[in-house]
Image: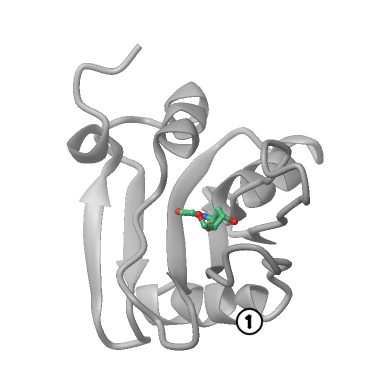
Amino acid sequence: MNYTELIRQALSAREYSYSPYSHFRVGAALLCKDGSVWTGCNIENRAYGPTNCAERTAFFKAVSEGKREFAAIAIVGGEAELDWCYPCGVCRQVMAEFCDPDGFEIICARSEEEYKVYTLRELLPEMF
Ligand code: THU
């Protein structure tokens, strides 16, 4: 699967974002090594703390269905307009639990054409 297709799926997932407090809408599409894709959106809560990021929604959906081998994740986010959206520290740590630091690709996209690709190690050096 190419980056553009994965970004497209992240954009579709963003449509389901439940973000009435921050109005920051995020979508993610997680590609497994077997080719399956698991999408997620951010899900906020009036108590704030229980809020779940789009990336973790995608990871937890996949892991809870037996997936453990991950190749890449595309992330899109912003309020009305898309902006650069990078995974938070907690999501980076969740990625560290399951992903190869040098092989797993994190695709941060502002559109289907404009994106940056990082390895997990670049975004979480000296990880626990
Ligand atoms: N958020 C994500 O879903 N992923 C990120 O990479 C950054 C932040 C969410 C959490 C919260 O619902 C909103 O964006 C504002 O922080």
The image shows residue 124, relative to residue 14, as above or below, that is: above
Taking depth in this image into account, of 44 and 72 the one nearest to the observer is: 44
51 relative position to 106: left or right: right
Q: Quadrant of residue 68?
A: top right
Q: Identify residue type, mark 1.
A: Ser
The image shows residue 37, relative to residue 88, as above or below, that is: below
Taking depth in this image into account, of 66 and 49 the one nearest to the observer is: 49
Q: In the rendering, at what x and y percent does residue 100 appear?
A: 36, 30
Q: Quadrant of residue 113?
A: bottom left
Residue in the picture at 30% in, 69% down: 84
28 relative position to 36: left or right: left
The image shows residue 38, relative to residue 16, as above or below, that is: above
Q: Which residue is mark 1?
A: 12
Give the number of callouts: 1
Q: In the rendering, at what x and y percent does residue 2 appear?
A: 39, 74
The image shows residue 128, relative to residue 30, as above or below, that is: above
Q: Residues within 10 Å of mark 1 (few under 14, many from 20)?
A: some
Q: Quadrant of residue 26?
A: bottom right
Residue in the picture at 23% in, 51% down: 118
Q: In the rendering, at what x and y percent does residue 107 appear?
A: 34, 62
Residue in the picture at 61% in, 75% down: 14
